[in-house]
Image (spheres, rainbow, N blue to C red):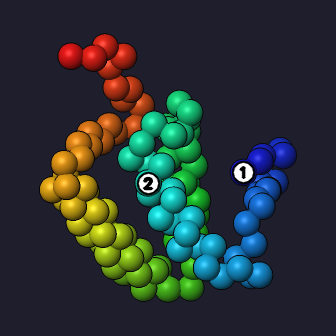
Amino acid sequence: MLQYGDIDIRFNTDLDPIKHPNVIPDVITRTSFAMTTRLWGGNERAVLAMIRALAVADLAVCVNRKEMVRHLDEDSEALARSFLYAKQEFEKNGGRMTIFPPNVKPSSFKS
């Protein structure tokens, strides 16, 4: 997302959902995974702020805001269940997972 002046916001992406409709579910899954890891490169707060700004702007101009919120709620709930199930299976098979919220870095010391 790039800003040129006060109201000129532009987007530059290498993803084309028109040509490749399956890219959207893939991006949702990959972004959700990135949000639970240290893959963000220290930009967590800025990225989350922009994601939320885009979501609010989208809701402000959509035709049926309540329906959009309902869809977002249903889709995010289903994805949250999937992540919880995957985490439980991972831990049941001996894996260990610690999720850090944005802007919280794991300790560099090992116990």
38, above or below 66, in the image: above
SS at badge 1: loop
Residue 56 percent across, percent down from the top left: 51, 62
Residue at 15% in and 56% down: 92
Residue beneath disc 1: 1
Q: Nearer the viewer, residue 50 or 83?
A: 83
Q: From this viewpoint, which residue is outermost toward the front?
A: 93
Q: Nearer the viewer, residue 67 or 74?
A: 74
SS at badge 2: helix
What is the C-alpha distance between the residues marked 2 and 1? 21 Å
Q: From this viewpoint, which residue is outermost toward the left?
A: 92
Residue 47 percent across, percent down from the top left: 56, 44
Residue at 38% in and 26% down: 105
Indicate which label's residue lies in the foreground, 2 or 1: 2
Residue 96 percent across, percent down from the top left: 23, 42
Residue at 83% in and 44% down: 5
Q: Amino acid at mark 2?
A: Phe
Residue beneath disc 2: 33
Residue at 55% in and 69% down: 26
> Residue 29: in sight, yes or no?
yes
